[in-house]
Each structure stands twice: as C-alpha cells, then as structure tokens.
Image (cartoon, rainbow, N blue to C red):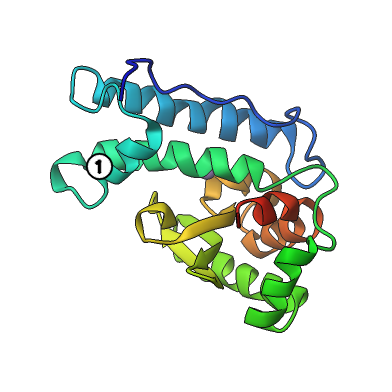
Amino acid sequence: MTTAAPITLPPLPYADNALEPVISAHTMSFHYGKHHRAYVDNLNKLIAGTELAAASLEEIVRASAGKADRVGIFNNAAQVWNHTFYWKSMRPNGGGEPPAVLKQKMDAAFGGVDACKKELANAAVTQFGSGWAWLVLDGANLKVVKTGNAETPVTQGLKPLLTVDVWEHAYYLDYQNKRADYVAAVLDKLANWEFAAANMA
Ligand code: MN
C-alpha cells in the first residue's frame, strides 16, 4: 500500500471485435466501455480520501467483503476484479481441448471435459438473476460454483480459474433472453483453457 494511484481500467486483451460472432463489438462497447469502466470510476470516487485510497484492487475487495459499511466499495471493486478476470477467461478461437494439467483435473472431478462444461453451463443458467459461474480450485479439487451480483470466489477461500458473466448486460444485445445459448457459445468457442490452466499454479 505504497502508491496512491487510482484503480485503472485494464486494456482488453484483444480487439473489441475479436470475439465475434459469439460476442459482438456492440456488446463489448457497452460491457467493457460502459459497465466495466463505470465500476472503475465509481470505485475511485468511493475510496478517494479513505484508508483504502492507496490499496491494491485485491486488497480493497478483501477489506470490504462482508462489511455493512463498505457495500458500495465491495460491489464496485469486486465487479472490477471479476470483469478483468472474465475478459481473460475468453480468447478468439478458444474452447477445444484444455491443457493436459487441467484436463486431468476435469476427468478426476467431473468424468471428462464435456461433463465439466455441462456443470459450468448448468451453474451459469441456474444462477437466478445477475451473477457469475466459475471454475475454481478448492484446495486441490476442481469445482464449479456460482456467485450472485458482485460476489467473487476470491473472498471465499477459493482460487478462480475461469468465469462466465451471466449478468444480462453480458448477453442481452446479442442473445436477448437466451442465456443458455450465450453460455454454450462462450464455453464451446471462446473458453480460454490455457488461462484457466495457468491459474492453477
Ligand atoms: Mn458484466
């Protein structure tokens, strides 16, 4: 906690049209350009002049989780963290076969890659209202969990490997109410299993 630099909006790891046709540049312009940016801007306003003003993003998330007087800070900080992680969870020409180190974990925990994807899709589709579906490590074990609104496995003793945003703003422009179609397309065509595998280390 040595610098007082504001929290910044990280650049997208690819061009805003790179995930087409699964996720359009139009969706990206709102989701990254408006929503993600607004969480960053709101967070900086909320922490200005407080003891969290010089903290890192992850420190802010941890210091505000479950604190009744820091709900606004937590919501915005966790959403900044979750979205940055979400962009990295996808890549152009993603999907396919996960790296062996991750595939072995999927086999052990779910009985295969397809079964793991089915579990992730089920979590994503059954999250009631806004939230996130996650592939995580719980100790040495691979698990699928879902979180509501801004909640994040970061504060739950879990190590996130990959996430899918299921807030309506993530898919409504491209898929309207068909969340299941969005989730299936993301997992089949965009999932960045190399990123997930790297997060296991
Ligand atoms: Mn979102």
Q: Quadrant of residue 2?
A: top left
Q: Quadrant of residue 113?
A: bottom right
> Could you tell me if residue 191 is visible in this image?
no
Q: Residue at x 39, y 49 (%)?
A: 150
**x, y percent for residue 98:** 78, 62
Amino acid carrying label 1: it is Ala
Q: Residue at x 18, y 23 (%)?
A: 50
Residue 153 sits above or below residue 9 on the image = below
What kind of element bears circle 1?
A: helix
Residue 194 sits above or below residue 156 on the image = above
Q: Which residue of the protein is positioned furthest toward the left in this rendering?
A: 69
The N terminus is located in which quarter?
A: top left
Q: Viewed as shown, does residue 139 lie left or right of 185?
A: left
The C terminus is located in which quarter?
A: bottom right
Q: Residue at x 27, y 49 (%)?
A: 65
Q: Residue at x 24, y 43 (%)?
A: 64
**x, y percent for residue 34:** 52, 27
Q: Which residue is mark 1?
A: 63
**x, y percent for residue 90:** 70, 46
Q: Quadrant of residue 91?
A: top right
**x, y percent for residue 115:** 71, 79
Front residue of this view, candidates 44 and 143 = 143
